[in-house]
Image: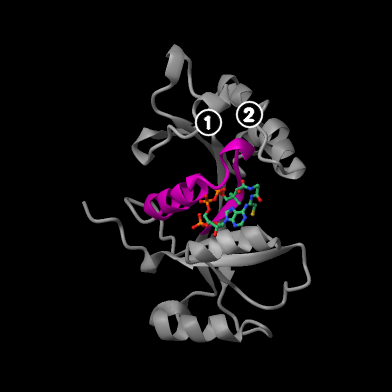
Amino acid sequence: MLSSYRNKIEYGDFVLYNLRGLEEFKCCQHFDCGDDDLNEFFQCDAEPHKTELLATIYCLKLKKATDGKDSPPLAFISYSNDVIPTAKTKNFEAFQDYLTNSIPAQKHYPFLPAVKIGRLGVHKEYQGHHIGTYLLNLTKQLFTTNNRTGCRFITVDAYKDHKVTKFYKKNDFQFLNDSDRGKKTRIMYFDLKRYQPPSE
Ligand SMILES: CC(C)(COP(=O)(O)OP(=O)(O)OC[C@H]1O[C@@H](n2cnc3c(N)ncnc32)[C@H](O)[C@@H]1OP(=O)(O)O)[C@@H](O)C(=O)NCCC(=O)NCCS
């Protein structure tokens, strides 16, 4: 069914659903982004994470489906609250300098508020069609518009895979520090103060 949508996608075609309740989690069941851990999260763990208030999970679909059928999920993204510590620590100097120069008030905060992209997966048939980029832009917009709380950064534990870090770098994310160089994931961040909404 998915292949019938490929090559027909335009940005205005997307709608983002906030997943609530069991019925809507059924749409996660056959989702395949090509990564077993992420698939398992969306297929099995998303609902309990939502119920336990640990994460919110969103699904990207097409607004209008062909053949009168609902669009299958094209991508999922989950968010949780996060913080970035401001205390001076080893391997953190570059970010410290950035904070001192760009956020004078940071000395009043032992931690700066952030939102973490917990999981992000685009259906494997649709990868490379800028859906991931669309979701990151939407995230930047969501957390700078009418926020109920202050939120300065987006963070993500990015897979240390060249194509994944390239994807985040291309979307203006940077590595937070060097201490996770040897790990399977690297923390990357985007400063929401730098977000420029697209002009009308
Ligand atoms: C990583 C992922 C979310 C990117 O989403 P996407 O919709 O495929 O990415 P986009 O089309 O927006 O790509 C934007 C840029 O990222 C890079 N990129 C994305 N996929 C790539 C690939 N397979 N190989 C090389 N570079 C890639 C490219 O630089 C691309 O820019 P370009 O189109 O100008 O070349 C998606 O591929 C995915 O779900 N992968 C499997 C799960 C995963 O690894 N999730 C991330 C966990 S941290």
Give coordinates of residue 29: x percent, y percent. Answer: 67, 26
Closer to the camera in the image, 107 or 194: 194
The magenta stretch spans residue 133: yes
Q: Secondary structure at mark 2?
A: helix
Amino acid of disc 2? Cys
Q: Residues within 10 Å of mark 2 (few under 14, many from 20)?
A: many
Q: Residue at x 54, y 66 (%)?
A: 169
| Residue 188 as seen in the image, left or right of residue 34 | left
x, y percent for residue 179: 72, 77
Q: Quadrant of residue 91?
A: bottom right
User: Residue 70 appears at what percent x and percent y?
Assistant: 48, 19
Judging by the rendered image, the residue that carries numbered circle 1 is 19
Q: Are marks 1 and 2 in contact (CB under 8 Å)?
A: yes
| Front residue of this view, candidates 122 and 43 | 122
The boundaries of the magenta stretch are 115-143
Q: Say if 23 sits above or below 180 in the image.
A: above
- Determine whether the residue tagged by mark 1 lies in a helix, strand or loop: loop
Which of the two residues, 20 or 68, is positioned nearer the viewer here?
68
Quarter of the image holding residue 87?
bottom right
Question: Which label sits on residue 28?
Answer: 2
Residue at 58% of width from left, 19% of height from top?
23
Decide whether residue 101 is among the magenta residues.
Answer: no
Left or right side of 28 for 66: left
Type of the residue with mark 1: Leu
Q: Give left or right: position of 96 versus 164.
A: left
In this view of the protein, can residue 99 be seen by the observer? Answer: yes
Q: Quarter holding the N terminus?
A: top right
Q: Is residue 181 above or below residue 80?
A: below
Label 1 packing within 10 angstroms: few (<14), some (14-19), many (20+): some
Q: Residue at x 43, y 19 (%)?
A: 66
